[in-house]
Amino acid sequence: MPFPIQTAAVNHAASDCPDFRRWCDGYGVIQHSEATQHQVSLLAEHLVAAGHQPDAATVYRKLADLDRLTSAGLWLVVHMTYARRVDVSGQPLAPQDLKTNPEGHTGGALNMVPAYAGYLALNNLTGRTRSWLMGQGHCVAAVDALNVLTGNLHPEQAERYRGPDGLSTLVSDFYSYRQKPDGTMAAPLGSHVNPHTAGGILEGGYLGFAELQYAHMPLPGESLVAFLSDGAAEEQRGSDWIPRWWRAEDCGAVMPVMIANGRRIEQRTELGTREGLERFEAHLEHRGFVPFRFDGRDPAAFVCALYEMEQALATNGEAALRGESGYPVRVPYGIAETTKGYGFYGASSNAAHNLPLPGNPRMDARARELFNEHAARLWVAPDQLQNAITHLNQHAGQSRPLERDHALATRNPPDPIIPRLPACRECTSPMKAVDDFFRALVAQNPDLRARVGNPDELASNRLGGVLDDLKHRVNDPENDQESVHGKIITALNEESVVSACLANKAGLNLVASYEAFCVKMLGAIRQELIFARHQKEIGRPARWLGLPVIATSHTWENGKNEQSHQDTTFCESMLAEMNDVSRVVFPADYNSTLATLPSVFRERGTISCMVIPKRERPCVF
């Protein structure tokens, strides 16, 4: 995916620039390959030509600042795992400065530092705040560390972590488990992405759901960077279908980047081998992606990759909008090649996942020596770091929001216009009330993007009108119930279809399934409920419109398909969730179903389980 400009002239001009040569020298453990140097020189020319930066030298200076911010982020992450305090002067830590019980997903968090830092720098270089999503939520230390350093924080974290001893408080809080007298957590910090994480929208406790959701999240005109796990990518096949669902007409730009560190918890991934990575690339190509590799150890390589991906997808999407090409369009897919825990001792080992040192540095002199030695390589002098942060933090001057307030993190669609439908006096299917109401709801709210999650048969579930109006989304329609621009996401993969609706927080959603199949959706739904409950607890409740997950063909009426199709687990589990984010209702007829639906869609940050018969029932209410 090369930049379409004269590369030789650009490279010659760059090599004569002192700021370019200074950046090329790298900083600490951060080095820049010839390939990345070449890409950066092209990036600088593009940014200047687009009017984003005054000259190439400014770009190179900011990328040198990025190196220093990244190194400081790596330094802070290892302290979050092992230390009770930091010494900003870079002096070695003594035994009493280190934790009795160190904890942290250190290797993955270290790999995320250059990724998230590159995302922040790209926003600065282009004057535009993009959204972000991280599938591997256990790598949150990288995000929190860089957010604290740059001041991209919610008020509770700013108050606690931006004072004179703020960084020491941060590392002490990480995995502290301290509680307030009322039982809530004392620190606005977690082991995974949570509502205290500035810009966080998905916990990422279950690997694989970000891969299924990211294509359905942004609206046209928005951009989303999705950081993904190589372990989840090779094992969650539904993520391969993103080009099947993406449409320029109703989807914003998506930039999926897999952090290919080659290891899951205690094993090498298949993608950790050259042959496995090549097979995965071939697989992605067959599915409509354009995979390409870059140096995942270098934050500037992330900047270049993300910029290229966004430009390429925009070009492909515009061609589809003009009718010059069909769907699926080719979706760029970045593969950031790195080693687990790069930048610190133990990189590339199984131990890098959690605690890379060979012992507890508080108790073990050799481990303490290794900690101080390798942390020293990451340290950045405070004056250099502050200068770098100042140059990369220009939100007010660029008139753009903090990354804390990106578009997906601040979703607040307008209240929907609720249709008024007449009651029914005849014997009819209660599911027909859902069909009638949702059709009318979508028709009266054309500015709210509609999504229907369908893992089986809409017609069988008495949603024939929804099918006629909204249609299955396909690339090559073969009948009048299918359309390239259909709103119904149909796949025999329950997690994928429910994720399409959970991700569509800007619009109207309906999930309908055989009751037994809802059980496979439960993990994704619980992740959403937990996050929404935590948002409410800290005073920033979710504002997305409520949605129903309808369990039909249920136990009490389904006697023909064996006990595998008779499973009350879903509604029972939803009854156990907190009822301010989870509702469970059992409407008995058309009229009680119709009476319930307006409140389902008026609610904010709430998921309603509705167990509804599909057979004809007399109207008794």
Image (cartoon, helix red, strand yellow):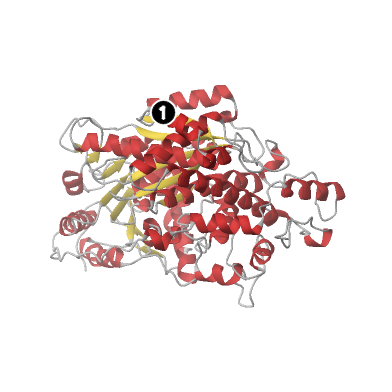
As drawn, 371 above or below 538: above
Q: Quadrant of the N terminus?
A: top left
* Label 1 sits on residue: 9
| Residue 150 found in image quarter | bottom right
Task: State the residue in front, 184 or 479.
Answer: 184
Q: Quadrant of the C terminus?
A: bottom left
Task: State the residue in front, 370 or 449.
Answer: 370
Q: Is residue 559 visible?
A: no
Q: Which residue shows up at 34% across the image and 38% down it?
A: 311
SS state under label 1: helix
Q: Which residue shows up at 54% across the image and 40% down it?
A: 18
Amino acid on which disc 1 is placed: Ala
Q: Which residue shows up at 42% across the image and 60% down it?
A: 395
User: Which residue is at the far top?
Assistant: 275
Mark 1 crowdedness (10 Å alpha carbons): few <14, some 14-19, many ≥20: few
Q: Is residue 356 visible?
A: yes
Q: Which residue shows up at 37% across the image and 50% down it?
A: 515
Task: State the residue in front, 314 or 424.
Answer: 314
As drawn, 105 above or below 545: above
